[in-house]
Image: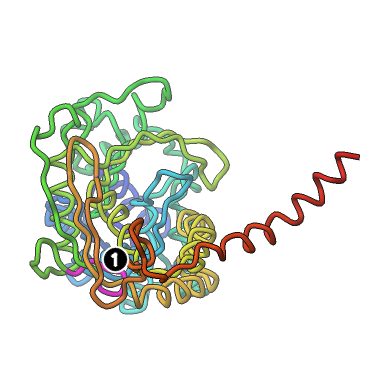
Amino acid sequence: MSDIKKAVLAYSGGLDTSVILKWLQDTYQCEVVTFTADVGQGEELEPARAKALKMGIEPSNIYIDDLREEFVRDFVFPMFRANTVYEGEYLLGTSIARPLIAKRLIEIASLTGAQAISHGATGKGNDQVRFELGAYALNPNIKVIAPWREWDLLSREKLMAYAEKHGIPVEMKHKQGGSPYSMDANLLHISYEGRHLEDPAAEAEDSMWRWTVSPEAAPDAAEYLDIEFKSGDIVALNGVTMSPATILAKLNELGGKHGIGRLDLVENRYVGMKSRGCYETPGGTIMLKAHRAIESITLDREVAHLKDDLMPRYASMIYNGYWWAPERIALQTLIDQTQKTVNGWVRVKLYKGNVIVVGRDSKTDSLFDPTIATFEDDKGAYDQKDAAGFIKLNALRLRIAAKLHQK
């Protein structure tokens, strides 16, 4: 007999998590609490409530939470303060949502007195690591039930047979062969994996993309956008102050319209395999370009270079599920300290898949001094003779080595 009396399930209402719900009831004989997170996936979430009710879940045990503002404010924005990119290209759209979902799972477990949480991440993927590292960091005593590591329902056909046997409603698309891709969406991105994309040599069909037009089909006229920053975060677009979630949604709309933010990537998963995925991150692509532009005039050179040195480690922490680890929190403290002077505006031009910076300024924190940088007469602001000594000192070790080899 299991000592787990109640478990909180991260529940989407789809085939996998609907099967998991019934499997938990049968295998663990436990009460199930369902949690559905709205992180901006753009889908109607109330059907998940109806499905949970149909499967015998008490109304008080059904949680459907709008986490969009918290997601952008407390997870996406802090990540972009670091200009975070994994393996040179990936903006970590899936990775950054997982610590928030783990946090809310633990909170609901505490509220309902559950001893365990459960998720539908497979044993091949990164999400199992992200969910569980986050959960253990927030509650070291929580038990985790990962059905994909326990059951034998390791194919779509077996899941379908289990659903049919137990009267679990199955969407028509699954009955007819299913969506051609495994998709994950939130306010920052959509990811596509599986089936056609499992051949890394095959180009994704243009019909796959949902948020972005192809650059070829984008408008022939460029669009200008003014982006205002305060302490490293975007606070307004074209002079209009907006909430974090509204800002990201608007950037997604504009970027998608201009074919910005598509990525086809083979990444190195934490569990050891290479995996091909396609991503749409239109708003994030604009954010990254604009943030680097405002930092270019407001950050000290060595501070900027230090951030660039540390960023790959920070990106790996997020990718590998260490958002709640002390090293990520410590590094975030350093990053946020650097952002106190990152204030001002950036103007970008959006055109056929490109984000082109065309202007930037900071009235209070700009380190750009035109009287020194000018190619005209600087009236003695910079003594060019100083460069000779600087060069000689820096060349000294090179000259010594060169003389040694001349012998």
Which residue is the site of mark 1? Answer: 33
Task: Indicate the quadrant where residue 389 lies.
Answer: bottom right
Q: Is residue 310 left or right of residue 84?
A: right
Viewer-nearest residue: 346 or 234: 346
Residue 132 position within the rendered picture, expressed as x and y whole percent measured from the top left = 47, 61
Viewer-nearest residue: 379 or 198: 379
- Taking the spot 15% from the left edge, 51% from the top edge, the residue there is 42
Residue 375 position within the rendered picture, expressed as x and y whole percent measured from the top left = 36, 56
Viewer-nearest residue: 253 or 45: 253
Residue 18 position within the rendered picture, expressed as x and y whole percent measured from the top left = 27, 48
- Taking the spot 21% from the left edge, 54% from the top edge, the residue there is 55
Q: In this orientation, does residue 106 appear?
A: yes
Q: Main secondary structure of the magenta part?
A: strand
Query: Is 113 situated above or below 295?
Result: below
Screen quadrant of the C terminus: top right
Task: Indicate the quadrant where residue 5 lies.
Answer: bottom left
Disc 1 is placed on an element classified as strand
Q: Is residue 252 left or right of residue 387?
A: left
- Taking the spot 51% from the left edge, 55% from the top edge, the residue there is 312
Q: Which residues are magenta?
A: 230-235
Viewer-nearest residue: 52 or 325: 325
Q: In this orientation, does residue 105 appear?
A: no
